[in-house]
Amino acid sequence: MERKIAKIPIFIYGTVFFFFVFKLFFFAAEVGEIPDEGAHIGYVCYLNEHSDQLVPDFEDMHACSLLEEHDGRQTYQIQQDEWNYLGHPPLYYHMMKPFSGMRKEGDQMTVNIKLLRYANIFLTAGTMALCFYLGYSRLRKYTKKILPHVIFSVSAVSVPMLAYTGAGVSNDNLAFTGMVLFFWGLLRYYENQINQGTYLLVGMGFFVTMLSKLTAGEILVVALLLVLINELIHKRGFQIVWNRYFAVTLVFYLVPIAYYLYLYSRYGGVQPSLQTLHYDAYIQTGFFVPEDQRPAQYTFLEYAGYYWRQFISSWVTIYGPMTLDKARNFVSWIGPGFVLILSVGQGIRAVVRKSKMAPMYFALLGGMIVTGLTQFLSAYRTYCSAGYMGGYQARYYLCVIGFLAYGGAMFWCEKGEADIEEKEENKEENEEVNEDMAVSVGKGIGRRREILLLTLGILYIAALLYGDFIYVLLHGTFRM
């Protein structure tokens, strides 16, 4: 019987994974055109055409506009007087080159959009499978209950933009992979698995993330700094980096550092922007609003209120060619919104209970908060100088969905992340509880609490599912 019960979580993860993959193919086939997809494709095609360049000449990368799509192929027109506004690191785009099937004729180029999207689906699905492995392998150490496994798996797949972005061409998908590797390494480190495998995971996570997306890279760098500070103050000191494990992985850190130093020396910043490279072209785009067309100027507090409302809205809904407005449907906010709230709550609980995982929560949540504030201030400066009202996308934080789902699931575990050693010490004492105690008032209260938690958990899972794909099916407009 115990073996059969132990297999139930595996069945749950398999079912939810199948559901997630279905969503990926659904979005790729019926919606497509995720945010900035054309610009990402243009970046891939530029590297295909300039195969000798590891780092592109960003100032020479032209924009392209979609002319037609037929039989899984898209044809783009290269705009000689317009420029690609992406300044992302090139790792993801090099990886996508073999799947583009690019053919160029004059100022037109044709790409295999179906194969490109399938490559991203495979990348995103593989990363989610790794997330599920982390959830299954860790949660079963802390609880024998099924509910936390359901909470983790459904939370991980039910923030709407995750499957939508994962179904298209976007460097967000590789940033997701990098952050999951990094999170895996941190988990192992705070489980006292301090060995070469742990350092390799952290190093590979750093390498992949830093060479995929700067926003995700900032989360990771801040988290690493907080981990280092915590070690210097409380635990191993400089031994965290002064060891043979770190020496083996040093190249994973040196390559991204060299890349950003190169960018800074060439462009005066760590990410080239259209504003600095081609200002005349920049003021002709939607990123710049002429002063006579700008609405009444917000004060700082007014802008802050606008920004954070839009930020949360972009987390709980879908933004792109198929934009779903949930402003009047607050029920659909509950599930995706609580993915954030429960993870923060679990982080606070871990600190209060002095869990061995508390520094991990502090580091990753701290990285998200610092990066969120940086993004807000950058958006505010752009609003003041250019009148642009965007820059609030919360999808940049989808790369840490594995960590957020883990925190949310642990929130439903009775002991949270109390050390396994403590759990083992109390095992004998718990086994001595006799049958008379099972019918005591305390046990009755415990059962009522369990029923309440189970009910709330089921309602939460329903809210997650409704706020994501069910809402999309009810209110989305598709090409079919």
Image: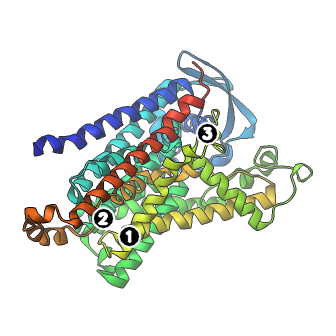
Against 149, is 308 above or below? below
Residue 392 in view here: no
Q: Relative to 49, is 23 on the left or the right?
A: left
Residue type at mark 3 is Pro
Q: Earlier in the sequence, mark 1 or mark 3?
A: 3
Q: Relative to 367, is 430 on the left or the right?
A: left
Name the residue nearer the viewer: 253 or 372.
372
Spatial CA distance of label 1 from label 3 is 37 Å
Q: Quadrant of residue 383?
A: bottom right
Residue 431 in view here: yes
Q: Quadrant of the C terminus?
A: top right
Marks 3 and 1: in contact by CB < 8 Å? no
Q: Quadrant of the N terminus?
A: top left
Name the residue nearer the viewer: 13 or 278.
13
Where residue 127 appears, as percent x and y from the top left, is 37, 44
Where residue 424 appears, as percent x and y from the top left, is 13, 68
Q: Residue at x 56, y 60 (%)?
A: 262
Q: Earlier in the sequence, mark 3 or mark 2?
A: 3
Residue type at mark 1 is Arg
Residue type at mark 2 is Gly
Name the residue nearer the viewer: 10 or 217.
10
Against 369, is 124 above or below? above
Mark 1 sits on what residue? 349
Give the label on residue 416, or none. Answer: 2
